[in-house]
Image (cartoon, rainbow, N blue to C red):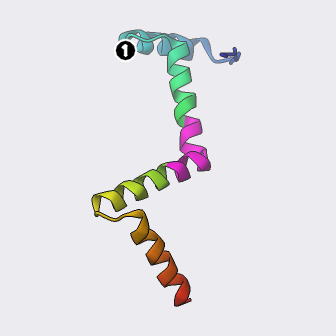
Amino acid sequence: METQVIVRIDSRLKQQAVGLAKAEGKNVSLVIRELLEKYVRDRDMSLYIDDLWVRIGNSLKNAGKTQNDVEQAIRDVRKHS
């Protein structure tokens, strides 16, 4: 469910934002939503960690590693710690 947020900005800034958004075929609400989504995404550690796990998994797959290889590597490291 979407909700509304009221933000107060200078009228000159609003006019500039409207013009730039319009030039991109967007409205100001869409531009602000995109900016807020990026802001949260860039600062949300859980999203970063989730993305990191995906990248690690993809790297392992690309290297031909299997779940058994990973489990064996963990056992080996624990044995030598």
Q: Is residue 31 above or below residue 49?
A: above
Instruction: List x then y, in percent, for residue 46.
Output: 60, 48
Q: Residue at the spot x=37%, y=63% of the render?
A: 66
49 in magenta: yes
**Range shown magenta:** 39-50
Q: Residue at the spot x=55%, y=21% of the render?
A: 32
Q: Residue at the spot x=28%, y=63% of the render?
A: 64
Dominant SS of magenta comes to helix
Quarter of the image where the N terminus is located: top right
The residue identified by callout 1 is 24
Q: Is residue 7 above or below residue 19?
A: below
Crowd class of label 1 (few under 14; some 14 to 19; many from 20; radius 10 Å): few
**Camera-nearest residue between 81 and 11:** 81
Q: Residue furthest bottom?
A: 80
Instruction: List x then y, in percent, for residue 7.
Output: 68, 18
**Camera-nearest residue between 12 and 65:** 65
Q: Secondary structure at mark 1?
A: loop
Quarter of the image where the C terminus is located: bottom right
To which quarter of the image does residue 3 belong? Answer: top right
